[in-house]
Image: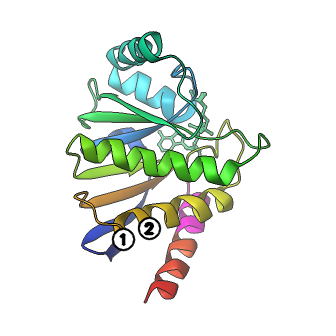
């Protein structure tokens, strides 16, 4: 499913984010940038050890990444040239919506600063971090739309959802947002 907002395509796809042909993919990261399971595990396996090495370098120079923050590394052996590591909230820690919105917007911002034209997000915080998929869609989709409405050089924003259930939740939310929009 695809919609266009102010010239930028916002697209929903189902599948494995590490297989996408985009300039940049977003990792659902933790504060210490340790590539664990879920999306991070897939990135580690498919992208090779270079990505973790770059993450370790960032941590040793700048310390932990705050929740809601995002940093960027190369894409190692992935098709994507860059990986943005966005730290989403853990369910129950408080201010989850604000932190998830910040993680989304900060990812778009740092990607744009690196000249990225196409970027793919997973449903951040909805795996190991335990946030509901509905809540994630309610935060990430409006955050991306309002970022685009502010004007951007990014041409394509993909939400890559791992399963049918998550895809359908995002689709329903995006359709509703577009109705409000028109
Ligand atoms: N492509 C797209 N989506 C995926 C993929 C994939 N290859 N694999 C899983 N998902 P998670 P979080 C979905 O756990 O909740 C890690 O250990 C998954 O079904 O990756 O933010 C990190 O190192 C879920 O809907 O991220 C962190 O410590 C969504 O992606 C921590 O987990 C996010 O699941 C981050 O937890």
Where is residue 42? Give x, y as percent: 46, 30
Query: Which is the main secondary structure of the residues drawn in magenta?
Result: helix
Quarter of the picture containing the C terminus is bottom left
Would you name the residue on which mark 1 appears? 149
Front in this rendered view, residue 135 or 42: 135
Where is residue 60? Give x, y as percent: 45, 9
Q: Are there few (<14), some (14-19), or many (20+) residues within 10 Å of tag 2?
A: few
Is label 2 in a helix, a strand or a loop?
A: helix
User: What colour scheme has been applied to the protein in the rendered image?
Assistant: rainbow
Residue 3's label in the rendered image is: none
Q: Is residue 22 visible?
A: no
Looking at the image, which residue is at 58% across and 26% down? 31
Looking at the image, which residue is at 59% across and 49% down? 100
Where is residue 61? Give x, y as percent: 42, 12
Quick check: is 150 in the magenta stretch?
A: no
- Residue 13 against residue 145 in the figure, above or below: above
- Residue 16 against residue 73 in the figure, above or below: below
Would you name the residue on which mark 2 appears? 146
Determine whether the beta carbon of the residue marked 1 sits less than 8 angstroms from the nearest atom of ligand 1: no
Label 1–label 2 contact, CB within 8 A: yes
Query: Looking at the rendering, which quadrant does residue 110 occupy?
Result: top left
Identify the residue at the far right of this view: 92
Specify the segment rendered in magenta: 163-170
Query: Looking at the rendering, which quadrant does residue 68 occupy?
Result: top right
Q: CA distance from mark 1 to mark 2?
A: 5 Å
Looking at the image, which residue is at 52% across and 86% down? 180
Report whether 20 appears left or right of 129.
Answer: left
- Residue 150 against residue 166 in the figure, above or below: below
Image quarter for ligand 1 equals top right
Is label 1 in a helix, a strand or a loop?
A: helix
- Residue 59 against residue 84 in the figure, above or below: above
């Amino acid at each position: 499913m695809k919609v266009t907002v102010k010239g930028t395509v916002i697209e929903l796809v189902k599948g494995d984010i590490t297989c996408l042909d985009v300039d940049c993919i977003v990792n659902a990261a933790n504060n210490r940038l340790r590539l664990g399971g879920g999306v991070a595990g897939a990135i580690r396996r498919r992208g090779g050890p270079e990505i973790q090495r770059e993450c370790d370098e960032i941590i040793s120079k700048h310390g932990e990444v705050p929740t809601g923050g995002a940093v960027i590394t190369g894409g190692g052996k992935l098709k994507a040239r860059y990986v943005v590591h966005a730290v989403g909230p853990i369910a129950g820690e408080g201010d989850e919506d604000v932190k998830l919105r910040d993680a989304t917007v900060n990812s778009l911002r740092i990607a744009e600063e690196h000249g990225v034209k196409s970027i793919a997000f997973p449903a951040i915080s909805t795996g190991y971090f335990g946030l509901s998929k509905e809540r994630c869609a309610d935060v990430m989709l409006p955050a991306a739309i309002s970022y685009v409405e502010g004007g951007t050089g990014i041409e394509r924003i993909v939400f890559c959802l791992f399963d049918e259930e998550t895809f359908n939740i995002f689709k329903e939310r995006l359709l509703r947002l577009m109705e409000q929009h028109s």
